[in-house]
Image: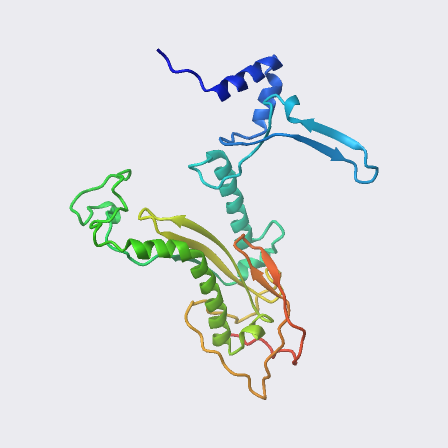
Amino acid sequence: MSPAAPTAAIRRLAALARHGDLSAYAHQIQRLGGCERPVRMEGHRLDVHAATGEIVREIADRDLPAGQLLIRCNNRRATRCASCAEIYRKDTFHLVTAGLSGGKGIDPSVTGHPRVFATFTAPSFGPVHNRPGGGRCRCGRLHPDDDPALGTPLDPDRYDYRAAVLWNAHAGALWGRFTTYLRQHLASRAGLSRSALRHCLTVSYAKVAEYQRRGAVHFHAVIRLDGPDGPRTPRRTGQRPNSSPTRSVRRPASPKHPAPSSTAARTPSASANSSTSVPSAPPTSPAPRSCPAAP
């Protein structure tokens, strides 16, 4: 005896059969672009003319071929929706490419700006099964690439699961701490306070977080140094900023070079080549001295 079909599926098939012509249904599905998990919305929508208040269009779920308004899920994970994840991957590629070579509103002069590709990896929480250079694991086995044992601890009793969980839980905060210390270090190397650095330098970046096979989050980032006007600032001759993320030492202001006032600065967000304004206090001191060039 075959199992009974789900009640919900039967209702959808019956609703679809009532339309007779499947071309409209096919058109609605095609607009999803292959989305595997569309968001199903019920209700109605009104498009109203802003000036006259006239109803231009009304859409009700009962009038749609699928009986619902279907919207792409826009999930970034390929395991959830390969189609939406691929669109996101391609969009990210073009945004990062524009940040390196110009385009999409980014001036081509960014090709002369200092930039670096960096990977930030978690420390070891204990030895795991792996394929070092495609060779044998320290357990003595030659794991195939799809072996589910890859990334699992060699000794589960001694693996530091607590530290691994804490790392993943605080990975976002650690990245934020890195960007803070990066600016502090750049200011220290330039002989400026951090507020003065904002008049000379903008740190722009695009980063991607992903899981390693051992389950630990790590980051890939493209970091670019721009002038105070962002990507439109041409690079000065002889300028070689150092982007090493080390601890910085704050230098007190001297009478000769008073501390500058804080002004609106551009701070990059997690999106490629984007920035937001940082609120600032009203000016209370003279403008900063000229930005020094590295030797």
Q: Is residue 279 above or below residue 120?
A: below
Which percent across, then down, holds residue 270?
52, 54
Q: Residue at x 45, y 64 (%)?
A: 177
**Quarter location, residue 231:** bottom right
Q: Position of residue 108 (x, y in %)?
A: 59, 55
Task: Identify the image quadrant of residue 144.
Answer: top left
Number of marks in the rendered image = 0
At a point 49% along the width and 71% down the height, the residue shown is 184
Relative to 135, does residue 285 appear above or below in the rendering?
below
Q: Which residue is more in the foreground, 169 or 203?
A: 169
Q: Is residue 2 left or right of residue 20?
A: left
Identify the residue at image location x=37%, y=13%. 2
Q: Is residue 254 above or below residue 5?
A: below
Seen from this angle, which residue lies furthest right? 52
Residue 295 in view, yes or no = no
Quadrant containing the N terminus in the rendered view: top left
* Residue 38 in sight in this render: yes
Name the residue rendered at 48%, 59% in the picture.
223
Viewer-side residue, 25 vs 157: 157
**Residue 140: x %, y % from top left:** 15, 46
